[in-house]
Structure formats: structure tokens, C-alpha cells
Amino acid sequence: MVDIEVETDSNALISQGSGTYFVFVFFITYVISKLLNLAFKKIFTNVLTLEEMGQYGIFLTASITIITYATLGLPTALSRFAVTYVNNSNKEKLKNMVFSGFVLFLVFEIIIVGILLTLYYTIDYHPWFLNIQDQYIFILLMVIGIVFAQVISTICYTLASALQNGRHYAIPIIMRALLQIPLSILFVVYFKLGVKGLVIGLFLSELIVALYSLFIIMKDLGIGKFSLEEIKAIFKYSFPGYIAGILLTSFNLFIVAYVDYIFIENAEGKGIISLYQNGALNIVNFLLIIGTAFKVVYPPILYKNFEKKNFEEINYITTNVSKLFTIIVIGASIFLFAFSPILINLLTQNIYLPSIPLIPLLLIASALELMHPIMTFGYAFYMKTYWQIVAALISIPLATIAGFFIIPLNGLLGIGIAYLVFRVLFFVTLFIVSQHYYKINYDLFMYLRLFLATILAVGIGIIFYYYVFNPDYGLNLLASFSISGVLYAFFLVSFRLIKRADFDFVKNLGQTFLQIWKSRLAK
């Protein structure tokens, strides 16, 4: 196979970008896309009913599930091999991997859709959650189109992300968010198509972004050849994460579909799903900003030290990062819950206030999800990623069983309990495995003091909420848990959980991170 020199044009998709600049673009893109997504929800939660937004949420979950099934781990593999192929000036292998993975995706998408159509036309079976406004075939065709388009755009910004190419990472993501709002308004408000209008708006926005992404891929990369060697590379590297992803997306689909099925007679299920996705989850997603910040800064430093066998440095960094991350996430969670009535009214409308009791459960579950890459990396050092499958096979069936019994009894809270069961089991399993491969000596006494500070602060807030103020989803909740937040900060200082050395550590961590990216840029 002939090696071809990589494009030298700094604007090309497969040109190696500046790491420091990319981090800046990444955060700007992330913030803009999140704000546009919040604007989208604000508009349509005021235009459509709870039940209609719930139906749209089920549709999105089903689409994501099909995407995960059909992509076969291609984005994960590209994020790993793109840098290697580009740095080795082997554009041909990169072209072949993209082309081979895309062909395989098409085959699997055709198989999945073929099965669904066969079931529909032979025994009149179809998943009820895709039968929006009694137009199953139309909605299924929209799913096919959305999945097809998203895979093309995902290939584009995955390559850009792997190569720290800020321009081609940001444009597809921001373009999608910008287009979806006016197109959806056109079909929902002007043509009065309801949920179907949201689906059409999403499809058209994905199609436009896919056409742009395809143009960039064709211009800067070209068309490769089908290669079994690259297919094997995709499966070998991404198979564990792919299987774990399948299990997780299937679990997500089960939760929303099961809620819809249990309460299908009075349409309450779709309302519950909307409260979960557009109410509680809207608030919890603010934690992702913190998690993303740590995930961008932390892993490059961690793996750099592992390659150099700086094990003492790894232990020092991990114990400090995990401590600071836990402290910040707990504090952020308390204040997010305190301000949740204001945020829900700001981001949606007051009919979503009944989702507030679900928020604490989802905050804990999300915190565990964010702690996963920070405290459970030991197995990844030694490429033992199959443990992700084991953890998923332990946690998801047990969480599914819990959801099967709890959701009919508790409705909205049942969703939070099921997710919490899953996240606890998944995190604990991988934490134990990680400690087996690479042991970190965490300060258990410090975590005990932190737990005590949290319990005291939250407990006093609960007492104020129920016994000093009148319980409501308004200013009384804000006042009660703002007191909790202030007390939490006080206890952090009183219990000596925050020291001057922690601030110095954060400063040094940031400087080390910048040095890593500068050294990469110098190469």
C-alpha cells in the first residue's frame, strides 16, 4: 500500500491542529450548542404539551439506539487511529477505515430497518413508541434518514476532534443546533404538524449538516477502498465500548418505552417522560460542564505520566483530582437543586416543576457517571476494556429488573431509582476492577468527613424546607437549600477539607496541561 502525504493546508479536515486552540474551541462550541439546545427546549416546551414532548423524547432515544447499533464503534476507532495514520502520513489507511466503517454501517442499518419493515408487513407488528400520529412508516423513514445523516457528520467532527482541528469540529455541531430551531418552528408553528414537525425539522437540519460534512470529507480525504484489515482494527479496538454502548442505549430505550407502555392508557407515560427529559434532566445536564472540563484536562496528564512510569505522580494527581472533583460536584449539585425552580421556569415553563423531586436522584447518578473516567482508569492502562462489558452486564440487568418493579409503583421517581441502581453498580464494578490493575490509596478518612459535611448541610436544608418554611417548588426550596450550600462551604473549611495546597495543585495542573499541548504543537 502506498503512503500519501497528508494535506498541508491548515484548513483541511485531516490537518493536525493546535491542542491549546482546540480546547478553547471545544469549550466555546460546547457552551454555544448547549445554549441553543436550551433555547430549543424553551421554545417547544411552551408550544407543545407534556405528552407531545414526551413522544418526541421517545423518538430521539429510539434514534440514538439505532445509531449506536449500526455504527459498530466506528467513531471510537477513528478517535484512536486518526492521529496515528495522519502522523505517519498514511492517508490511504485512514480513507479505507472511514469508507469500510461507513459501508458496514449501511449494511447494518439496512438489516435493522429490513427487520422492522418485515415485522410490520407480515405480522403487523411495530414498536408503539415510533407510531407518532399513526404514521409509523413515515416516522421510521425519518429515523433512517436522521441516523444516516448523523453518521456522516459524526465521522467529520470525530476526525476533527482526534486531530484537534477546531474549525471542522465546531461547524457541524453549531450548524446542527442553529438549523434545528427555525426549521422546527416552521413545521410545528407555521404548518401546525405538532410532534411530526419536530421530527421533520430535525431530519432537515441533520441532512444539511451531513451534506456539508460529506463535502468536507470528500474534499480533504476522498473515497477509500473496503478493507477487512481496517474492519478488524475497528472491531478489535472499539468492540468492548461498542457492546457496552449497545447495552446502555438499550437500557435507556427500555426505561422510556416501559414508562410509556405502563401508562399508555391515559397518556400519562409521555408526560412523565417529558418531565424527566425536559424538566429534571435539563437541570442535571449543567453538571456535564464541570465533568467535561475535568475530562479534557485530566486524561492527557494521566496517560503522559503512565507512559513515563511516573507512578507517584499518577497517585498524587488522582487523589487530588478525585477529591476536588467530588467536592465541586457535591457543591454544584446542592446549588443546582436549590435554584431548580428558577431554572425550570427559565428553561421551560412551570408545568415542569413536578420534575423537581427527581433531580436529586439524577444528580447522584450523574455524579457517579462523571467520576467514572476520573477514578476507574486502571483497567484502561493495560487495554483491558472488556471490563466495560462485564460492568454493563452486571449493572444493566439488575437495574432493568429494579425498573420493572419500581416504575409502575413510583412513576417519575422510579426512573431516577432505576438509573441510580445502574450507575452505582457500574461505577462500583469498574472501581474495584481498576483498583485491581492499578491501586490508588485514597484518603478514606477525608471522604468520610466530606460525606459527613454533605449529610449535615443537606439535612439542615431539609429541616428548614419541611419544618421552618412551607414546602413548595419555589422560593422556600431555594432558601432552604441555599442555606445547605452555604453550610456545605462552611463545613469544608471547618473540617479542613480545603487547604491552600489544593489551590496550588489546581494551578500546577493547569500549567502542566498547557505544557503537554505546547509540546505536542512543537512536534
Image (cartoon, rainbow, N blue to C red):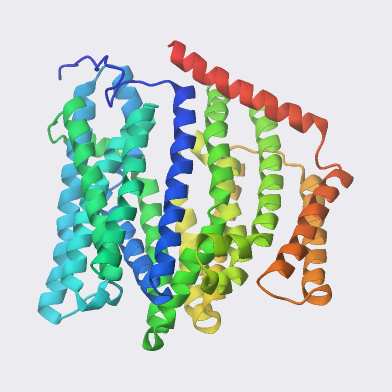
Please identify the residue farthest to the right as the structure is shown.
494
Camera sees residue 376? no
| Side (left or right) of 227 relative to 369 | left
| Side (left or right) of 172 relative to 270 | left
For residue 123, which quarter of the picture? bottom left
Q: Where is residue 465 in the image (x, y as percent from the top left)?
A: 77, 71
Residue shown at the point (15%, 51%) measured from the top left: 107
Please identify the residue farthest to the front as the structure is shown.
190
Q: In which quarter of the image is the C terminus?
A: top left
State whether residue 162 is above or below residue 273. Answer: above
For residue 139, which quarter of the picture? bottom left
State whether residue 319 is above or below residue 306. Answer: below
Residue shown at the point (13%, 36%) measured from the top left: 226
For residue 138, which quarter of the picture? bottom left
Residue shown at the point (19%, 29%) measured from the top left: 95
Q: Which is nearer the eye, 91 or 464?
A: 464
Camera sees residue 491? yes
Please identify the residue farthest to the top as the structure is shown.
522
Q: Position of residue 314 (x, y in %)?
A: 63, 29
Q: Which is nearer the eye, 341 or 43?
A: 43
Residue shown at the point (53%, 41%) measured from the top left: 292
Q: Where is residue 116 in the image (x, y as percent from the top left)?
A: 18, 69
State whether residue 211 is above or below residue 51. Answer: above
Q: Position of residue 82 (x, y in %)?
A: 32, 28
Q: Which is nearer the eye, 245 or 366?
A: 366
State whether residue 267 is above or below residue 108. Answer: below
Q: In which quarter of the image is the N terminus?
A: top left
Number of numbered markers: 0
